[in-house]
């Protein structure tokens, strides 16, 4: 479990570095990042319904272990087998709209809000969006909307 947390911490740092331009960067909500890491450390088991929903979603990988599940206008959803979670790359400056689009897509397979918040699903801005928002006052939260 300690290795998983270390890997996730490194991935969050990589997302910050890769998504942010060198002279200015999007500010990330540190409190939300800490909550994300806590959820990973103490991951709640999925309910039977959420396990079935996850299986329906992963069926889109056609036997692959990891990969892109959905590529929409406002976001791309990818599953990463190790460390076993969903990544959502936001591709619109309307960050909340991109997040809501992803949540809607996941829920269309039956994944609950609880699973989206606690599985967890990780959100990050694309490189292009980070560049566009670099000089803004936006603080980016890597959790889904309505996740405390």
Image (tube, rainbow, N blue to C red):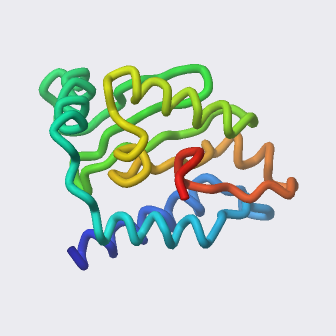
Residue at the (59%, 45%) spot, across then down = 145
Q: Nearer the viewer, residue 135 or 140?
A: 140
Measured as percent of width and height from the top left, residue 85 is found at 31, 48
Q: Is residue 123 left or right of residue 56?
A: right
Residue at the (22%, 47%) spot, across then down = 46
Give the quadrant of the C terminus.
bottom right
Extreme left residue here? 63
Q: Is residue 80 left or right of residue 102?
A: left
Give the quadrant of the N terminus.
bottom left
Residue at the (42%, 69%) spot, across then down = 37
Q: Is residue 111 left or right of residue 58?
A: right
Measured as percent of width and height from the top left, residue 62 is found at 17, 21
> Picture quarter containing residue 142?
bottom right
* Relative height, residue 10 to residue 53 (above, below): below
* Relative height, residue 19 to residue 86 (above, below): below
Residue at the (20%, 54%) spot, across then down = 45
* Total numbered circles: 0
Measured as percent of width and height from the top left, residue 61 is found at 23, 26
Extreme bottom residue here? 2
Q: Is residue 36 left or right of residue 98?
A: left
Q: Nearer the viewer, residue 37 or 4?
A: 37
Q: Nearer the viewer, residue 77 or 114?
A: 114
Measured as percent of width and height from the top left, residue 58 is found at 22, 29
> Picture quarter containing residue 140?
bottom right
């Amino acid at each position: 479990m300690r290795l998983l947390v270390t890997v996730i911490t490194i991935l969050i740092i990589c997302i910050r570095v890769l998504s942010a331009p060198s002279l200015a960067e999007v500010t990330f909500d540190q409190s939300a990042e800490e909550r994300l890491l806590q959820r990973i450390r103490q991951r709640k088991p999925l309910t039977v319904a959420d396990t079935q929903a996850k299986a329906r979603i992963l069926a889109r990988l056609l036997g692959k272990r990891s990969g892109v599940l959905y590529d929409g206008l406002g976001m791309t959803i990818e599953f990463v087998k190790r460390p076993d979670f969903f990544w959502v790359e936001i591709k619109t400056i309307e960050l909340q709209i991109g997040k809501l689009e992803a949540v809607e897509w996941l829920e269309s397979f039956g994944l609950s809000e609880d699973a989206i918040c606690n599985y967890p699903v990780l959100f990050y801005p694309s490189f292009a969006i980070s560049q566009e928002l670099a000089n803004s006052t936006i603080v980016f939260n890597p959790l889904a909307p309505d996740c405390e």
